[in-house]
Image (spheres, rainbow, N blue to C red):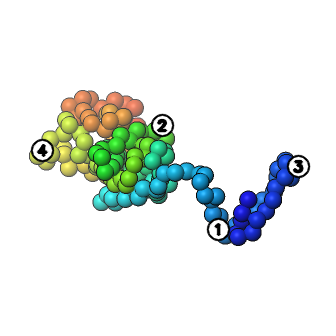
Amino acid sequence: LKLNGQTVEVNSVDAAVPFVYTASSVTPPSGGGSSGTSGNITVTKPANGTVTTTPSSAKEGDKVTVTVKPDAPYYIVTGVTVKGTNGTVTATKNADGTYSFTMPKGSVSVSATISHIYNLFKDVPTDIAEYGTAIKWAVEKGITLGTDTVAYSTFSPYNPCTRAQMVVFLYRA
């Protein structure tokens, strides 16, 4: 075994005894180790959040985790795109809200789409000023997220407000 230019011999008796060696640089032996080359991961910063990858560069076949953090609580992640030299790579959403993908050969670029919840409400026309601006205000203040808190796609402006919803509105206001 060679560490920092010094040869260290380890016999079968010594191999059973744990030891720690802190090295400023380690050179892997020739002919062994991983044969893949690291690919660059380029991250495009969204306008309203941050995107990070772990690790920041990876070899072909390595698992890469993408973490997306919106700047404000009323923004949500609506997608992650990974593009490699041979096309788009599938990024899978994990249970903890991160995304992961398997590093392809070569380099990739990672981007995320972060949308304002208000823009996702399919049942709130943006041209209706009498309640559209009030709904947008309530979302921005964190008072409501709509009636579909999984996809954030509906607000249900024509449904009656339940007692439970009113209590939540008053508590958050």
Residue underneath mark 3:
13
Instruction: Rate crowding at label 1 as few (under 14), some (14 to 19) or many (20 or more) other CA atoms within 10 Å.
Output: few
Q: Residue at x 79, y 62 (%)?
A: 8
Q: CA distance from mark 3 to mark 1?
A: 26 Å
Give the side of residue 64 with respect to residue 111, left or right. right
Label whose residue precedes the other's in the sequence (3 or 2): 3
Label whose residue precedes the other's in the sequence (4 or 3): 3
Q: Could you tell me if residue 17 is visible in this image?
A: no
Discs 1, 4 touching: Cβ within 8 Å: no
Q: Secondary structure at mark 1?
A: loop
The N terminus - image quarter: bottom right
Label whose residue precedes the other's in the sequence (1 or 2): 1
Give the side of residue 170 with respect to residue 138, left or right. right
Front-most of residues 30 and 80: 30
Front-most of residues 123 and 112: 112
Q: CA distance from mark 3 to mark 2?
A: 45 Å
Residue underneath mark 4:
128
Label whose residue precedes the other's in the sequence (1 or 4): 1
Q: CA distance from mark 4 to mark 2?
A: 37 Å
